[in-house]
Amino acid sequence: MFVQGGGAGAHEADAPLAASLKAALGKGFAPHYPRMPEEENPQIAAWAEHVATQCARLEGPLILVGHSLGGTTLLRALAEDQIKGEVSSLYLLAVPARDGADWDFEDLAQPADLARRLASIPHLALYHCRDDEVVPFAHLALHAKQLSRAVVRPRSHGGHQFGEDLGFLAQDILRDDTG
């Protein structure tokens, strides 16, 4: 499942990311790309509930990908044990963190024991582009500190939308899924 970011038009803006991932993964994968409710005014609790409902409709071990606020949503849903079933992988792309400064929003807060709550997920990776114009690159380090076992994969360029090419992520998913 690929969970979009927030803001007016975000589902449409993230559609090239979801399509790129689907194309790079090939025939063995059918990524689910649900539209999040009220994307122009995202409420993480409501989004987490929606994601949990969407996940309940899927079969097999779940591979979860969250872009921006979609990643925040996945972290919240997983931390609160809303997603039932086995999660084999969690990939987070340009996810904002509560930084105590410009991004000091309660919806971005994660529990102090987040790493423990995600311990059962075998594959966990964080990605962020250094030239992200929306979410500060420094947020990658904040998440990496809290999720110390995560693979951290900074990217030199691609902006917030990763140049609309998630081929690199597909490679990691295929390696993790088959390795």
Image (cartoon, rainbow, N blue to C red):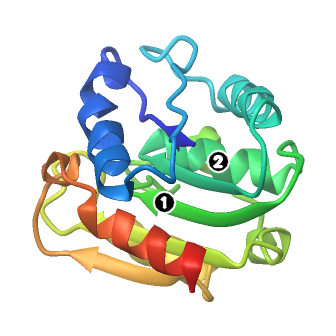
Q: Residue 5, position in %: x, y?
A: 42, 35
State how many labels appear. 2
Q: Determine if residue 144 is in view.
A: yes
Q: Quadrant of residue 15?
A: top left
Left/right placement of residue 65 relative to residue 110 reads left
* Residues tagged 1 and 2 counted as in contact (Cβ below 8 A): yes
Image point (28%, 77%), residue name: 154
Which quadrant is the C terminus positioned in? bottom right
For the point 27% across and 56% down, the residue is 166
Q: State the residue position of label 1.
A: 92
Foreground pick, 61 / 116: 61
The quarter of the displayed image where residue 56 is located: top right
Where is residue 8 shown, x and y percent of the image? 33, 15
The reply, left or right, for residue 111 in relation to residue 164 is: right
**SS for callout 1:** strand
Tag 2 residue: 74
Locate residue 44, reporting x and y percent.
64, 32
Work out which quarter of the rendered image holds the N terminus and state it.
Answer: top right
Pick whichever, 83 or 73, lies toward us: 83
Q: Residues within 10 Å of mark 1 (few under 14, many from 20)?
A: many
Dot label at residue 46: none
Residue 142 seen:
no
- Between 127 and 19, the one nearer to me in the picture: 19
Q: Position of residue 33 (x, y in %)?
A: 50, 30
Q: Amino acid at mark 2?
A: Leu
Q: Is residue 134 above or below residue 24?
A: above
- Looking at the image, residue 118 sits to the left or right of residue 39; the answer is right
Residue at horizontal 42 percent and vertical 78 percent from the top? 141
Rendered position, 116 above or below 108: below
Q: Tell me where residue 89 sits by quadrant.
A: bottom right
Q: Is residue 10 above or below residue 150?
A: above
